[in-house]
């Protein structure tokens, strides 16, 4: 890649830092990604070290540098919405969308956080809120993901495996879900965590550039057009990964359960084994009905029993749960959906490798191990394999068996 470091004054921090130019700003629109940074916002602030331009565009991808229709604006600007119009400072914009672009190094800041690429402000249909979307090429996007998803000091081969998995996941998600909405991926763990410039280090950029354009496809002979699959990954599988179908209800050939003897030595003990979590009946009922209104017919939830699980050597991952209610009716739910409905942060019920037992006026989740859904690559396991001298390719082949690496560009 041969990126040349240049010095730029970053907005909001007031000190000089070495900042790489943003690569791929002339990439084909297929290789740009729209990252939802702020959903349903009513205001935000935008700044940039270079002159910024604002204009209305129907395009979602490459624009010629400085080719926007508006005039250069002084930074920082406060963005608001009034009378159904997006205002940049005092200037109202008549269109539904405003794209803000800057000159090299193509960096802007939104509410004090720096990102690469362009910023698109999209008015929502309600006329009262807008979405702030970062339109950024795939490679600089990944620099903001890999460093947010893995510690930058981890082994280079683990970081490379993470870069390839994240690149694939992003492109798959964009192609499948981005078509009828103004964004492709969220910037949270709902998809993959993206922190923009603050996640970047030299090691992270090395992992991105060493795997430049490489993605996973579901088997040999597949192309990026036909073979991408959702390369799920999670923090700590707990000793064995899980079949995708049993967690997300959809099967993909390389997303099969495999043993993972690697994460136990990498994860901290207090993370690998997690402490008991308790939830009372009222909380369980309220959260389930809010998320799944059809469960209201059960009345108050009085019983939670695992009806399907995957048995591994010394433990089992619960995969399906039967709920019983005070009306005597029953229903069932995937265990992963129960977990994230009761505990959306995933920090109390870290995984579905646990026992659910009646406890006081509710239930306890006991003997838990692992962290995350357990499908695809185990991130701590990837680091464990890298420490044993395995390559990124070997790591990916272990967690996505039968998959193959191909180049996008
Ligand atoms: Zn593992």
Image: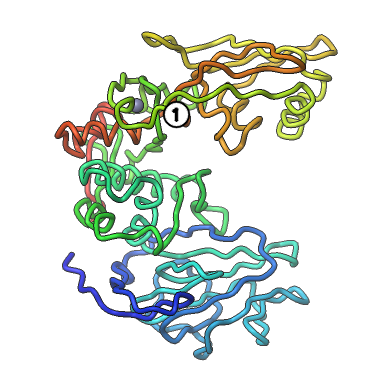
Q: Which residue is mark 1?
A: 270
Query: Please, which colouring scheme is shown?
Result: rainbow
Q: Nearer the viewer, residue 346 or 103?
A: 346
**Residue 311 screen position, x and y as percent:** 43, 9
Establish whether ligand 1 lies closer than 8 Å to the Cβ of label 1: no
Q: Position of 320 compared to 315: left or right?
A: right
**Residue 291 screen position, x and y as percent:** 71, 34
**In the picture, residue 323 is in which quadrant?**
top right
Q: Quadrant where the N terminus lies? A: bottom left
Residue in view at x 28 percent, y 71 percent:
20
Residue in view at x 38 percent, y 23 percent:
241
**In the picture, residue 117 is in which quadrant?**
bottom left
Q: Nearer the viewer, residue 59 or 372?
A: 372
> Quick check: 76 above or below 130?
below
**Residue 368 screen position, x and y as percent:** 50, 20
Q: Quadrant where the C terminus lies? A: bottom left
Q: Quadrant of ligand 1?
A: top left
* Image label count: 1
> Quick check: 90 above or below 193?
below
Residue in view at x 65 percent, y 87 percent:
91
Residue in view at x 44 percent, y 87 percent:
51
> Quick check: 308 above or below 1?
above
**Residue 297 screen position, x and y as percent:** 82, 21
Mark 1 element type:
helix
Q: Residues within 10 Å of mark 1 (few under 14, many from 20)?
A: few
Q: Nearer the viewer, residue 297 or 28?
A: 297
């Amino acid at each position: 890649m041969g990126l040349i470091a240049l010095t730029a004054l970053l907005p909001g921090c007031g000190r000089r830092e070495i900042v790489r130019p943003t690569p791929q700003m002339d990439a084909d629109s297929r290789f740009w990604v729209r990252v939802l940074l702020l959903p349903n916002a009513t205001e935000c602030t935008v700044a940039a070290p270079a002159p910024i331009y604002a204009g209305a565009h129907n395009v979602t991808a490459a624009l010629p540098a400085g080719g926007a229709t508006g005039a250069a604006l002084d930074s920082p600007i406060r963005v608001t919405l009034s009378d159904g119009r997006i205002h940049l400072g005092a200037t109202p914009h008549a269109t539904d969308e405003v794209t803000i672009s800057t000159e090299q190094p193509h960096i802007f800041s939104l509410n004090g956080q720096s990102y690469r690429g362009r910023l698109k402000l999209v008015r929502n249909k309600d006329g009262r809120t807008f979405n702030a979307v970062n339109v950024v090429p795939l490679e600089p996007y990944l620099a903001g993901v890999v460093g947010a998803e893995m510690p930058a000091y981890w082994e280079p081969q683990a970081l490379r495996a993470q870069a390839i998995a994240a690149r694939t996941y992003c492109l798959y998600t964009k192609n499948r879900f981005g078509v009828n909405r103004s964004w492709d991926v969220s910037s949270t763990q709902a998809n993959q965590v993206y922190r923009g410039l603050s996640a970047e280090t030299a090691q992270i950029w090395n992992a991105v550039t060493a795997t430049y354009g490489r993605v996973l496809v579901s088997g040999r002979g597949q192309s990026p057009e036909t073979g991408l699959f959702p390369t799920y990954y999670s923090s700590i599988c707990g000793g064995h990964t899980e079949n995708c179908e049993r967690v997300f209800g959809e099967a993909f050939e390389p997303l099969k359960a495999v043993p993972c003897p690697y994460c136990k030595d990498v994860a901290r003990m207090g993370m690998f084994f997690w402490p008991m979590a308790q939830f009372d009946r009222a909380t369980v009922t309220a959260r389930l009905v809010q998320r799944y209104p059809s469960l209201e017919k059960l009345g108050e939830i009085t019983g939670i029993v695992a009806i399907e699980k995957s048995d591994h050597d010394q433990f089992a991952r619960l995969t399906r749960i039967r709920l019983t209610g005070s009306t005597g009716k029953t229903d069932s739910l995937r265990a992963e959906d129960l977990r994230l409905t009761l505990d959306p942060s995933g920090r109390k019920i870290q995984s579905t490798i646990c026992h659910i037992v009646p406890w006081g006026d509710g239930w306890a989740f006991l003997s838990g191990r692992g962290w995350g859904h357990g499908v695809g690559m185990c991130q701590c396991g990837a680091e464990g394999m890298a420490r044993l001298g395995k390559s990124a390719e070997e790591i990916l082949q272990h967690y996505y068996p039968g998959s193959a690496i191909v180049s996008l560009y």
